Amino acid sequence: MTVDPLGSDYRTPHEALIELSNEGLAVLDATGRYLTVNPAGQRVLGCDETDLIGQRSVFLGDGDHPQSEGHELDGTIWIGTAEVEYHVRTAQLDTGGACRIVRFCPTDPAVRDRRALAAFTRTAAAIACENKLDVVLDRLAAEVRDTVGMATCAVILVDEATGALHHVGKSGLPVDYAERIELCRRQGAPLATTKAIDEARVVVSKKFRDAALADPRWQPVHDILRTMDWDTYVAVPLVVRDKVIGALAGFLTEGRAPDREDIRFIAAMADQAAIAVSNAQMFKRLELQAAREERRKLARDMHDSVTQALFSLSLRTKALELSVEAGEDIDLLEQIRQIHELVCGAQTEMRALIMHRRPAALGEEGLVPSIRKHVAAVAAREGLSLAVESDDEFYEFDEAIEEDLFMVVGEAIHNVVKHAHATSAIVRIRRSFTDASVLTVTVIDDGVGFSGPRDDQHSFALLSMSERVKAHHGHLTVRSRAGSDPAHGTTVHAEIPCLSSSANSGAGR
């Protein structure tokens, strides 16, 4: 370098360009140590050139954990409180050796915003598409960690009953860290996570590592902290319907403090985590509700089909027992044959309920033929006069309607046998006279009827029939007159809007 007549240092055009560049520029030797750094680079690194020369570059990591051994390297790194983008390239020197050229500058806020938006969008998509909560929250923690530049990140839920903290989503944490933290909590360690949850606010705990190593209550994590450069801990509460259920939290490395944009992003992701947890809880409640409804429906179906067969079986065996005790002349083999048929029928219905949730005969024969077959079997078994009338033998419906109508008729006939003390009954299946789109199913018996309270089993049967009809936007009426009335008997009438509205279109084939 020479001195010009005005007394200022003389530089070549290339040197002047490097000196005046707004980007940081540095030349590294073959071992990754600084040979020269321009003024802009010194400002970014926070050191004078004299302090940097000979030091290993932060852009290549430390000697034990180099970030790259290749010819090119791009990335970001946090230096102090600023995120810095860098590009490393290999160049040849005039002497024949090789050096590395580093170009670096603070990350443009717009780039950070785009990266945060991309992370937010990916997380929202995961919440919408992924049905495993642990997978979603692990992804969310990783997105926050990478975007903010944290050493660790975790989604932590609090147990309302015990106060225990459960790490349900995590990134960068040792495998047993959650168990160790729980031990610290039980020993009375002041957890920033608990503070954020209890006070429903963002908590930033600086110099965490030094404070924890000096406190015996943090002893379960001391050996981890001694090997880490974790320094600042950030915890943002998770809120679901004005209730704090946990926190999104993590560590930043020494010298790195979260800025306002970091906190805003972490808070936005905490809202996403809260949505994911809330959705999972809602789905769990719905699954439980569905399971309860399925059990209730199975109980109803069993009452409507298998219970009828078992009731008939109990009557038949009791009658056989009494006949034998009385010494009556009976056809024992015929009685046993009928009992065997009842048992086989009950087994068939039970198998259909468990495996298919659908009466066995319906799939093969259709609704009206299946009802005829069922009614004929009951009539033969019970010695009653039972008949079926229909204006179309080949009505076709979807499986749910067929199943429920079959069950309604079966339950009504069962009530005739069990409660009515009737001698005859008739089942009518036809279009409504007033609305061709409505199917009517009517069961009329000449039994004793009823006028007062019914027993629990009878009430359950009526409720079961009503629920089945209402499930298809229909309605059920039960009209009964006691035996003292000349027009005694019971009429069960169901109407379901399930047919074509054209009277000539035919409900059948």
Image: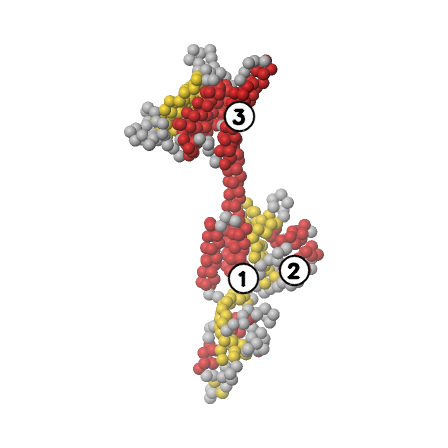
**For the point 53% across and 74% down, which residue is it?**
42
Q: Label 3, on which residue?
A: 340
Residue 35 percent coordinates (x, y)? 54, 79
Residue 195 percent coordinates (x, y)? 61, 51
The local secondary structure at tag 2 comes to: helix
Residue 93 percent coordinates (x, y)? 50, 82
Q: Residues within 10 Å of mark 3 (few under 14, many from 20)?
A: few
Judged by depth in the image, the label closer to the viewer, 3 or 1, is 3
The local secondary structure at tag 3 comes to: helix
Residue 509 percent coordinates (x, y)? 33, 32
Q: CA distance from mark 1 to mark 2?
A: 20 Å
**For the point 40% across and 27% down, which residue is it?**
369
**For the point 54% across and 22% down, which residue is it?**
336
Judged by depth in the image, the label closer to the viewer, 1 or 2, is 2
Query: Given the image, on which type of amino acid does mark 2 rest?
Result: Ile
Q: Residues within 10 Å of mark 2 (few under 14, many from 20)?
A: some
Position of 167 relative to 17 (above/below) = above
Question: Which quarter of the picture shows residue 401?
Answer: top left
In the image, 360 versus 178, the foreground residue is 360
Q: Label 2, on which residue?
A: 224
